[in-house]
Image: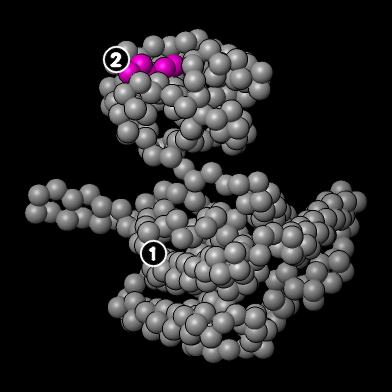
């Protein structure tokens, strides 16, 4: 192991800066190569036997293509969390060469934190659910533009009408203006809202089709998570696509920390001070979990749609989901009674909900693993 060479790569769309930390302690830059498969293959050949190399680079917009190529060449590699790379407080010079050398040096010292790299199935599913999330954000912006335009021009719906229902949209289509410019503006905003709605419908249908084609083990976890209140298919798919196998987390607390939904802390000596949540980790997952947590404001119950979602899951999973309803609703009422802000309370409920998500997913993954082992 003392002969292993640690290689740091500062990756950009067109170039890669390369540095190597030698076994004898020397860290040196090797220059810059094009970010192309042939160049990377030649670099690996130049550095020596693949089993004596360890390569790393920071996660970024280039994705995991380089990781898959390096592992395909037999080189053990890691994708590093960029926010957890050690940085000197007084360091004011940043170049690609220095970044590559810092990665190589820290990688050899064991100071870097690798991220989970999804396989091709998780990556494809994650791209799809993130495309839907982007469409939902576009829908919100389009609705805000139209709503503020109507408000600015004095057009207001009846007080009994809820915004953005079918009834509300029918009312918007009856609004008329004296000026052709404003009429054209209204029609453009309406067309954009209808276009985004069609886009979301197409993406949700694509998610339905994608779930049918994923491996059976992943499909079982998606179905089981829907036994929880506030977690429908899109939410369950998002969780599985963003997290992969939840059994890779040793405990529920580890999952909570990974999501960035735990309190920050600044303690020293006898002083203990905790602040807002850290917001480190996966923001997409954090958003979907907090959205699901709002459902636990209501008393425990089972509606028709909820019964349908639970039809295919085992009694053990139903028991965990029912326990979650009681515990989280009780917790919500207790925190609200203490005078906590509602958003803080829901965030705390989301943190505890992650514990139930972890328990369900780990149980299902273990059952599927045992079943496959028995079949083999």
Residue 43 is labelled as none
Choose the circle earlier in sequence order: 1 or 2. 2
Q: Nearer the viewer, mark 1 or mark 2?
A: 2
- Please tell me which residue is depicted at 48% across the width and 32% down the height of the picture: 76
Quarter of the figure with the C terminus: bottom right
Per the rendered image, the range of residues in magenta is 18-24
Left or right of 12, for residue 201: right
Find residue 121 and report its horizontal and vertical position in percent: 66, 51
- Please tell me which residue is depicted at 36% across the width and 16% down the height of the picture: 22
Q: Is the residue 115 above or below the residue 253 in the image?
A: above
Residue 23 magenta-drawn?
yes
Left or right of 201, for residue 94: left
Q: Nearer the viewer, residue 164 or 294?
A: 294
Q: Is the residue 195 above or below the residue 51 in the image?
A: below
Q: Is the residue 110 above or below the residue 312 in the image?
A: above
- Please tell me which residue is depicted at 26% across the width and 52% down the height of the picture: 265
Q: Circle 2 is placed at which residue position? A: 24
| Res 303 visible | yes
Quarter of the figure with the N terminus: top left
**Disc 1, disc 2: CB below 8 Å?**
no
Secondary structure at badge 1 equals: helix
Residue 77 magenta-drawn?
no
| Res 152 visible | no
- Please tell me which residue is depicted at 69% across the width and 59% down the height of the picture: 214
Q: How is the image coloured?
A: one colour
Residue lying at the far left of the rendered structure: 270
Q: Circle 1 is placed at which residue position? A: 252
Mark pair 1, 2: CA separation: 41 Å
Locate residue 42: give its quadrant: top right
Locate residue 335: give its quadrant: bottom left
Secondary structure at badge 2 equals: loop
């Amino acid at each position: 192991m003392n002969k292993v060479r640690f290689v740091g790569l500062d990756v950009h769309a067109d170039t890669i800066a390369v540095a190597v930390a030698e076994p004898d302690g020397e860290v040196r830059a090797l220059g810059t190569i094009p970010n192309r498969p042939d160049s990377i293959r030649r670099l690996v050949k130049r550095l020596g036997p693949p089993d004596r190399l360890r390569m790393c680079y920071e996660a970024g917009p280039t994705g995991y293509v380089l990781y898959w190529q390096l592992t395909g060449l037999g080189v053990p590699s890691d994708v590093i969390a960029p926010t957890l790379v050690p940085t000197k407080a007084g360091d004011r010079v940043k170049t690609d060469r220095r970044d590559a050398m810092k990665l190589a040096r820290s990688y050899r010292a064991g100071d870097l934190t690798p991220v989970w790299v999804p396989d091709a199935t998780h990556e494809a599913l994650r791209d799809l659910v993130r495309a839907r999330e982007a469409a939902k954000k576009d829908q919100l912006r389009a609705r805000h533009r139209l709503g503020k335009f109507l408000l600015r021009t004095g057009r207001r719906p009846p007080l009994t009408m809820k915004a953005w229902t079918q009834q509300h949209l029918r009312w918007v289509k009856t609004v008329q203006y004296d000026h052709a410019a404003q009429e054209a503006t209204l029609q453009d905003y309406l067309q954009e809202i209808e276009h985004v709605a069609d886009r979301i419908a197409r993406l949700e249908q694509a998610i339905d089709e994608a779930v049918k084609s994923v491996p059976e083990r992943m499909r079982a976890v998606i179905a089981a998570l829907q036994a929880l209140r506030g977690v429908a298919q899109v939410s369950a798919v998002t969780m599985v696509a963003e997290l992969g196998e939840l059994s890779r987390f040793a405990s529920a607390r580890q999952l909570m920390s990974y999501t960035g939904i735990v309190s920050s802390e600044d303690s020293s000596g006898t002083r203990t001070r905790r602040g807002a949540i850290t917001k480190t980790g996966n923001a997409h997952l954090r958003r979907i979990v907090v959205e699901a947590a709002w459902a636990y404001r209501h008393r425990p119950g089972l509606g028709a749609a909820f019964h349908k979602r639970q039809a295919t899951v085992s009694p053990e999973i139903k028991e965990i989901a029912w326990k979650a309803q009681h515990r989280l609703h009780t917790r919500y009422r207790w925190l609200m009674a203490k005078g906590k802000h509602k958003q803080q309370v829901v965030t705390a409920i989301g943190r505890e909900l992650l514990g139930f998500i972890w328990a369900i997913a780990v149980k299902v993954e273990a059952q599927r693993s045992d079943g496959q082992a028995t079949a083999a």
